[in-house]
Image (spheres, grey):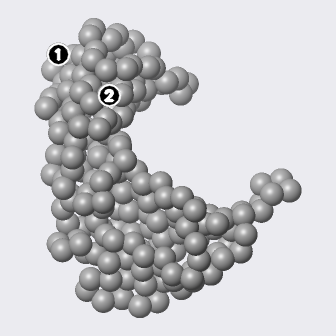
Amino acid sequence: MVHLKVHVEADAASSGCRSAVAYLTSEEPFEGVLELRLREGIAVTGCWPRWPDEMSERSAVWRVEPYTRRFGNRVLYSFGVRLDLEGRVELSAAVDRWLAEGGIVELEARRKGGLRAVVGPLARSYRVLSSKGILRAVEAAPFTYIVLEGDCVAVRLHTEEQGVLAGHLEYQPSFEELPFELELKGFTVASVESVLLARLEDLHV
C-alpha cells in the first residue's frame, strides 16, 4: 500500500501559490504513473528532481520510479516531485490582523474547521500579553515558536531586539483549495495526507 502526502505553500496576503510537493512512500516496491491536472490560472515554473515525462498547458505526467531509503534494517520505497508554481488559490483561512508596532506584535486569524498558526522564531525576551485559542510554546534553542490552534486564534506579544519575525498558518485544505487534481495509476493508495501552509509577510520588529 502506498501513502501519499501533498504539501502546498501559498502567500496568505495575496493567495498566490508558491510551490507544491507530492510525495509517495511504501514498504513494498511500486510503479505506475503520477498525473497532475492543473487548475485554471496555475502554471508550473520549475520542477525537481526532474521535469515530467509528458507535459501540456494543463497537465503533467511522470512515470513513477521509486528509490529506496534505509532506516536501520527497514527499507522504504519513495517517489516525489516538487513544483514551483504561479497563480492564485482560494484560501479558506482569513488573516484579520498581522502587524508589529513599538515592539508589540499582533496576529488574528480564523478558519471554519480550524487552523494552526505559528509565530517565530522569537528571541528569549518575548512576553505573551494575551491570546485566544490553544497556545503552546515550542523551544528550538536558542529561539522559541508560539503555536496557536483553533477556529479563531489570536496573540498579542511584546518582543525586543527581534529584527525580522516570520509566521504562517497551516491546515488541511479542501479539494478546491489545491492547485491541481492528482491521479495515481498502477498502484493502490492506502492513505492521503494534505497540508496547506500559508506564509505571512515578514514583520520588522
Looking at the rendered structure, the kind of residue marked 2 is Gly
Residue 203 as seen in the image, left or right of residue 187: left
Question: Where residue 197 sits: x, y (%)?
Answer: 34, 47
Question: Where residue 53 sits: x, y (%)?
Answer: 46, 89
Residue 73 as seen in the image, left or right of residue 96: right
Q: Which residue is mark 1?
A: 102
Q: Quadrant of the C terminus?
A: top left
Label 2 Cα crowd, 10 Å radius (few <14 / some 14-19 / many 20+):
some
* Quadrant assignment, res 46: bottom left
Q: Secondary structure at mark 1?
A: loop
* Quadrant assignment, res 104: top left
**In the image, what residue occupies the spot 37% across and 20% down?**
134
Q: Nearer the viewer, residue 155 or 163?
A: 155
Q: Secondary structure at mark 2?
A: strand
Q: Earlier in the sequence, mark 2 or mark 1?
A: 1
**In the image, what residue occupies the spot 17% across and 72% down?**
41
Question: Where residue 22 sits: x, y (%)?
Answer: 46, 65
Q: Which residue is mark 2?
A: 150
Asked whether residue 166 appears in the rendered view, the answer is no
Q: Is residue 97 above or below residue 79?
A: above
